[in-house]
Image (spheres, grey):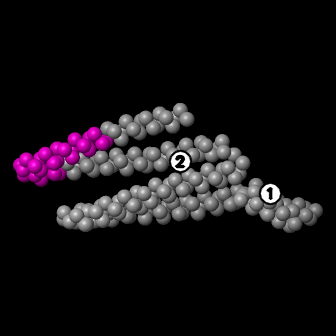
Amino acid sequence: MFGLISTLFAGIRGAVCSGAGGCEGDISTIGAFFQNMINGVGGLVMMVIGSLAVLIVVYGGILMMTSTGNPAGVKKGKDCIVWGVIGLVVALYARVIIDWVWGGANGGFDAVGSEINATISLILHLIFGILGLIAVGVMIYGGITMMTSTGNPMGVKKGKDSLIWGIVGLLVCLFSFTIVEFILAKV
């Protein structure tokens, strides 16, 4: 595809720049223009999709909190959160694929490999950051549940379990992050 566009612009350049003075730019300048345009539009789309995904996740959380135990409301909130996160992940991977294809079209997958590693590292930082925030949120929820249980053994147990699982989740997240960073540094 890029070869076809490149050939087209080379033909246009040859027709336009056939005078004695020649042309100031060359086909690589046109390629850089398209790459900058794709990066700009891609960045804007990612910003919009990221913002929408965060809003959908927040909306799902509000639905879950205000459902007052209604199973349909809890399910709708969970669905919003799941689909918001899936949408964000798909958008991030789409951006990686676009960068990879663009790098291959420009003749070099080697430079793109480091860009893909950087993009994967960015995505993993985002995912592990979100997971860490969720684990801290579960710990805070457990602490609040314990404090507001007013001595009710079931409430204390529920709060203690949430606190323990939040700590376990945070430790798993930290160890996973360390292992992934070690692997990415070696690749």
Report helix, strand or loop for mark 1: loop
At a point 28% along the width and 63% down the height, the residue shown is 75
Q: Residue furthest left?
A: 151
Residue 139 location, x and y as percent?
24, 46
What's drawn in magenta, residue-wise? 143-170
Residue 32 in view of the camera: yes
Q: Is residue 150 magenta?
A: yes
Can residue 143 be seen? no
Q: Is residue 128 shown left or right of residue 104? A: left
Residue drawn at x 16%, y 48% as measured from the top left? 158
* Quadrant of the rendered image containing residue 71: bottom left
Picture coordinates of residue 51 (x, y %)? 43, 62
Reading the image, the residue beneath label 2 is 119
Q: Which is the main secondary structure of the residues drawn in magenta?
A: helix
Residue wearing tag 1: 26
In the foreground, 72 or 30? 72
Q: Amino acid at mark 1?
A: Asp
Residue 106 at x, y = what percent? 71, 51
Of badges 1 and 2, the one in the foreground is 2
User: Which of the 4 image quadrants contains residue 16?
Assistant: bottom right
Depth check, front residue: 80 or 127: 80
Whole-angstrom CA distance, mark 1 to mark 2, is: 30 Å
Q: How many numbered discs?
A: 2
- In the image, 179: left or right of 26? left
Q: Is residue 173 magenta?
A: no
Q: Residues within 10 Å of mark 2 (few under 14, many from 20)?
A: some
Residues under numbered marks 1 and 2 in contact, where contact means CB atoms less than 8 Å apart: no
15 with respect to 74 (left or right):
right
Kindly identify the residue that appears in the image at 40 percent across and 57 percent down.
Answer: 85
